[in-house]
Amino acid sequence: MTYQIVYSSQATGPMTAAELEQILVDARAGNAARNVTGALVFVDGVFLQILEGDEAVVRTLMASIALDTRHDTVTVFHEAEVDAPTFGTWRMAYVSATPEEMSAWAGLPGTATVDALLQDIGRDPQRVPQILASILRHLAG
């Protein structure tokens, strides 16, 4: 079994392309060493991240991530044991999306803001698997 966690957080300031790239480089290296897979979605200053791996490893990683000063308001939407990692060999896939795309992924009508969308998902966490499947389709092209 694989432990999976999905959370969102708010960037504490504007993120440049170089800063996002550095986050991905660091995450991919660290995740490879820990045998963790996942994806990072960045929308209008909000991160949505999926982490998968051994539960103790992912929980420790999550505790470290929560201390990162580049973001705050960390909100966990989903925690579960899954049969296999959703993101397979991706040490950290990356998707840049619009609020409208995220709304469509969640099967929700267009939402004015990412915050409103995340509140909707928080009220209905059963949408998380649909979102993960949509992210995979987006990554496949």
Image (tube, rainbow, N blue to C red):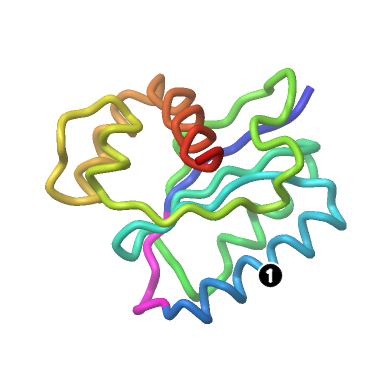
Asked which quadrant contains residue 31, the reply is bottom right
Asked which quadrant contains residue 51, the reply is top right
Q: Is residue 35 above or below residue 72?
A: above
Q: Is residue 115 above or below residue 126?
A: below
Is 27 colored magenta in this rendering? no
Which residue is rendered at x = 65% and y = 53% of the image? Answer: 92
Nearer to me, 10 or 112: 112
Tag 1 secondary structure: helix
Q: Which residues are magenta?
A: 9-15
Is 14 colored magenta in this rendering? yes
In the rendered image, residue 69, in percent from the top left (x then y), is placed at 51, 75
In the rendered image, residue 97, in percent from the top left (x then y), is placed at 36, 52
Which residue is rendered at x = 71% and y = 54% of the image? Answer: 61
In the rendered image, residue 134, in percent from the top left (x then y), is placed at 44, 31
| Residue behind mark 1 | 25
Residue that extends furthest to the right in the rendered view of this protein: 33
Instruction: Check disc 1 and give the amino acid type.
Output: Val
Quarter of the picture holding the N terminus: top right
* Neighbours of disc 1 within 10 Å: few (<14), some (14-19), many (20+): some
Left or right: 119 in relation to 13: left
